Amino acid sequence: MSDHRPSPEERGEHVYDLFRRGTHLLEAGDFSAATIPLERARRLEPDKTSIREALGRAYFRSGRYAQARDEFAAVVERAPVNDFAHFCLGRALEKTGDRAEARRHLALAANMRPDRADYRIYRDRLRAA
């Protein structure tokens, strides 16, 4: 019986394949199915922000807001200048009921990218609520 462990190169290729499969499903609108390969990719490469961001998007679009919040928080922790991650974290925090923290992340995203009207709309809507 072979006890072959994949090399780092083989492992990287496998992670990339899982990521591509997950993002393809995400782009096709099959959000729940996208979580399966993306979760596997995250287990193999938990520090990859691209994987965590895609998984967060899949969770959010599946209505799994607490899990989305956790993924976007991990991305923000590793990449604090990622405006999109702040925006998504703000949206997930809003959906899980943490409006004060949601306001903070939506404001950060809007301040980082003042050209993004969508960021400003969500920030202003939550500010007014």
Image (spheres, rainbow, N blue to C red):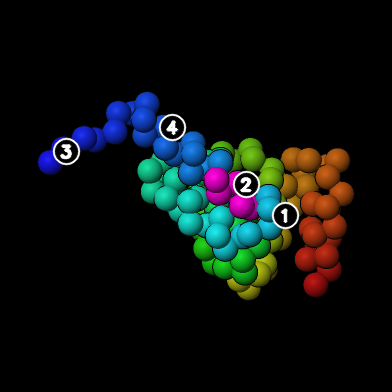
First reached walking from the N terminus: tag 1 or tag 4? 4
At label 3, counting other C-alpha atoms closer than 10 Å, the crowd grade (few under 14, some 14-19, many 20 or more) is: few
Q: Which residue is mark 3?
A: 3
Residue at the image point whose x is 77% and y is 44% from the top: 111
First reached walking from the N terminus: tag 3 or tag 2? 3
| Alpha carbon separation for disc pair 3 and 1 | 49 Å
- From what the image shows, is residue 5 above or below residue 85? above
- From what the image shows, is residue 6 above or below residue 110? above
Q: Which residue is mark 1?
A: 106
- From what the image shows, is residue 96 above or below residue 85? below
Residue 11 appears in the picture as rendered:
yes
Q: Secondary structure at mark 2?
A: helix
**In front of the other: 46 or 22:** 22
Q: Secondary structure at mark 3?
A: loop
First reached walking from the N terminus: tag 3 or tag 1? 3
Q: Position of residue 82 (x, y in %)?
A: 64, 40
Which tag is nearer the camera, tag 1 or tag 4?
Answer: 4
| Residues drawn in magenta | 21-26
Q: Amino acid at mark 2?
A: His
First reached walking from the N terminus: tag 2 or tag 4? 4
Q: Amino acid at mark 4?
A: Glu
Q: Amino acid at mark 1?
A: Leu
At label 1, counting other C-alpha atoms closer than 10 Å, the crowd grade (few under 14, some 14-19, many 20 or more) is: many
Q: Quadrant of the C terminus?
A: bottom right
Q: Which mark is residue 129?
A: none
Marks 4/3 in contact by CB < 8 Å: the verdict is: no
